[in-house]
Structure formats: structure tokens, C-alpha cells
Amino acid sequence: MKQFISFIKKEFYHILRDKWTMLILLVMPVIQIILFGFAISTEVKNAQIAVFDPSKDAETQRIKEQLQACSYFTIAEELSDYKQINDVFKEGKISMVVVFSENFAQNLVHTSDASIQLIADGTEPNQASMLIGYASNVLGMYQQELVKQYKIPFQITPEVRMLYNPQMKGGYNFVPGVMGMILTLICAMMTSIAIVREKEMGTMEVLLTSPLKPIYIILAKAVPYFILSIINLVTILLLSVYVLGVPVAGSLFWLVAISLLFILLALSLGLLISTLVNTQLAAMLASGMILMIPIMLLSGMMFPIESMPKILQWISAVIPARWYIEAIRKLMIQGVGVQFVVKEFLIIGAMTAGLLVVSFKKFKVRLQ
């Protein structure tokens, strides 16, 4: 029995000494329950919407107050011109625009009928459908209040319009997200494993004795995966266009440019992981499990970021895939010009530069 207990103690010591095992056993469940508990929600809250109200009468004001009062909407902007609608969608500030007809109150009183146009961003069809449903419910409750108040069968007819995705195809939503996830996981995982394999087998020191500088050896390990990732990118785009029917509405040049920059970022992330771990298994877990969950939950790939608690929204800002997915949706689905994705380009570029500097510096320290 004593021998059995001693073996149990030995196993405990072995587990406690391995920080990656402890991370998976104790920390990962806590992170998962928090992320799954707060991030996974099909309910849309605090969606940023805009209003175009040429009528500006008491009835439109009442509807706007009711929209603002519910937890689903935040009126972020009041438009002065109908032509501004496309611009606010391209800038990515707004998820839906409510357009009132001219002389809204007069039409409602005189004809008992008035129209409202609900324009949503169809690049995320599930979110757009929910926003339209929420807004229609608010209008329905307002209509019931009018009927009770005036005893007249008032009729408010919402006209629904889905920008960029009138057929409401699901591929428009998940293709950009899948692109971000695949490129991140493949590039980061393969690069980290390739370098850690050399360390684990003891051949990295042999490579460093060659005439080439260490930086060139590391780059030589990364270049094949960069080329293979380009092949993956081409394959994904061809399947998206010709199989899933998702068109490239914007500039193909800028779409490929930001994708190449993002591939470089993912390779840099893999290089950084390789400096932190010493085994292939740890590299696979770090690049696969630890990266996959934040990408799926916090990048906007599956769940709307604005519905998450503020702290998770701040955390999502440091996830590179979030900015890549936003840029792809704008370039590929909305067809905007490059001026509308400058922010995403700058953020991805800054992250890439930072990861490269930290990775190369830390790699040299570890190998000397």
C-alpha cells in the first residue's frame, strides 16, 4: 500500500512540475466556463443603429424613444441625408438604420397608415434577422398603444431591406470567419511545431553552427509555410466564390494584400509560441486549443462583439483574427474601398511588427 501511495505522490509531483499540464487541468476550465458563459449568446444587445427622420414629429420621436429604451438598441447617430446610409454601413459603425417616411405623423393620422424602412447589414444574416425582429416587435407594441389610445386601427408597415446579402446566405457570414481561423491555426501551429521539433530532437544547435545567421534559419523554416498558406488562401477563395456562391465584391488586390499580411502575423505568432515551449505536444496545444477558443468566441466569427460584456470586448481587441475578419467582410462582402479598412491594416501591421520583434529577440536569448 505504501508503494502504491508513493507512486501516486510521484505522479502528483510530475503533474505539478509541468506548467502546461497544470494550465490545461486547472486554468483552461475556468477560462472556458467564463468565455462560454458570457460570450456565447445568440441574443443581440446594445446594437448600434442610426435613424433617418425627415419628418421629425411627435410620433417619430416616440418611436425613437422606445427603440432607445429597450436593451437591444443604442441610437448612435441621426442622419441628415438618405445618402449617408451606405457610408455608415461601410465604416462599420452601424448594424441597422431606421428610415421614417416624410410626414410620418400626418400620414398616420389621415390615412391610418405609415411606412418605416428597416435597413440591416446582411453580411451577418443571423444578427440582421434578429435586429429586424426586435425592431418589428417595438413597432408592433407602439402600434398597439396607438390603437388602445385612439381606438383607430392604425397600421405601421415596416419595409425590410438587407444590404450586401439580400438572399440571406449563411456563407456571407461564416466564410470570413473561417478564413481567419484556418489561416491562424495552420500558420501558427505548423510554424511552432516545426521549430520546436528541431529543439526537441537536439538539431537546432547543429543548424545554428552553420554559416547562416540564426534569423535566416528561422525565416527558412517559416517560408515554406508562408507559401503553403498562400495556396490555402487561393483554395478558400475559389471554393467560396464558385461553390458557396460568396462573391468578391471589392478589390481582389487589397483582399489578397491584407490576407498576406495576416498570414505573416500568424507565422510570427507561431514563432513566438516556439520560444515559449519545448515540446511538440505543448506547441500543438498552445497553438491549437488556446488560440482556437478565443478566435471562435471573441473575434466576431460566431457571436456579435457588441453583445459581450465590456471586458470581453476589450480582450477581443487584442485578437488579430477579429480585425482580419472585419476587413474581409468589408472588402469581400460589402465591396468597400481600401480607405474603409485602413484601421484594420494598421492594427494587423502593428501586431505583426510587434510579434516579430518580440519573437526574434526572445528566440536569440533562448538559443544562446
Image (cartoon, helix red, strand yellow):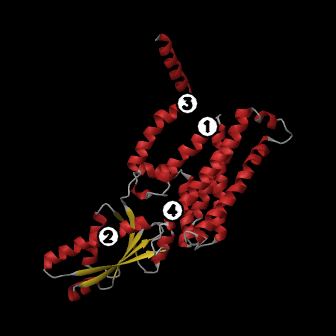
Per the image, label 4 sits on a secondary structure element best described as: helix
Q: Residue at x 70, y 55 (%)?
A: 228
Q: Residues within 10 Å of mark 4 (few under 14, many from 20)?
A: some
Residue 33, percent from left and from top:
41, 43
**CB atoms of marks 1 and 4 within 8 Å:** no
Left or right of 18 on screen, residue 297:
left
- Residue contact at pointers 3 and 4, CB within 8 angstroms: no
Closer to us: mark 3 or mark 4?
4
According to the picture, the residue beneath numbered tag 1 turns out to be 281
Can you give x and y, in whole percent of width and height, for residue 151 in the image?
Answer: 13, 80
Residue 48 placement (x, y as % from top left): 40, 65
In front: label 1 or label 2: 1
Res. 135 mark: 2
Which residue corresponds to the image point at 70% horizontal and 41% vertical from the top-left? Answer: 195
Q: Which residue is mark 4?
A: 174
In the shown orientation, is residue 173 left or right of residue 134?
A: right
Going by the image, does 178 lie left or right of 366? left
